[in-house]
Amino acid sequence: MIPKVLREKVGLKEGDYVQLELRDGEIVVVKEPSSAVEAMRGALKDVWPKGETSVKIQRKLRKEWQARAGSR
């Protein structure tokens, strides 16, 4: 049984599934994602520029494309 204090800190609720992993000789309890969306959360954090919105990126790309088209 996982102590209540620890369950509350990591957001484990009754019915949640966990995995046990061995890391550097220690057993680590990892909560399994409850949905596909949760499983993918953060997957692109190192790809998407930090603090950028899709609108900002689109505007930058448009300017680059217009500059290239104007230099032809």
Image: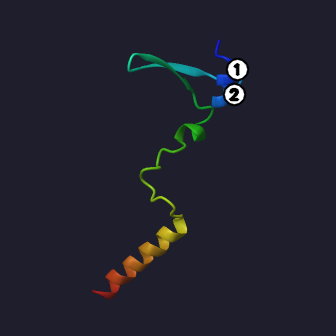
Tell me what residue is drawn at x 48 percent, y 58 percent.
50
Q: Is residue 36 positioned above or below 46 on the image?
A: above
Say which element carries label 2. Answer: helix
Q: Nearer the viewer, residue 25 or 65?
A: 25
Q: Residues within 10 Å of mark 1 (few under 14, many from 20)?
A: few
* Identity, as a three-letter code, of the amino acid under mark 1: Lys
User: Which numbered marker is on residue 8?
Assistant: 2
Could you tell me which quadrant the N terminus lies in?
A: top right
Q: Quadrant of the C terminus?
A: bottom left
Q: Identify the residue at horizontal 68%, vertical 23% (top origin).
A: 5
Q: Position of residue 14 (x, y in %)?
A: 72, 21
- Element assignment for label 1: helix
Q: Is residue 44 visible?
A: yes
Asked if the residue at tag 2 contacts the one at tag 1, i.e. Cβ–Cβ closer than 8 Å, the answer is yes
At a point 69% along the width and 27% down the height, the residue shown is 8
Mark 2 Cα-neighbour bin, 10 Å: few <14, some 14–19, many ≥20: few
Which residue is at the front of the view, 48 or 36? 48
Q: Distance between the Cα atoms at labels 1 and 2?
A: 6 Å
- Horizontal side of 33 relative to 43 (left or right) equals right
Q: Amino acid at mark 2?
A: Glu
In this rendering, is residue 67 above or below 41?
Answer: below
Residue at the spot of label 1: 4
* Residue 28 location (% of width, % of height): 50, 21
Q: Position of residue 18 (x, y in %)?
A: 58, 21
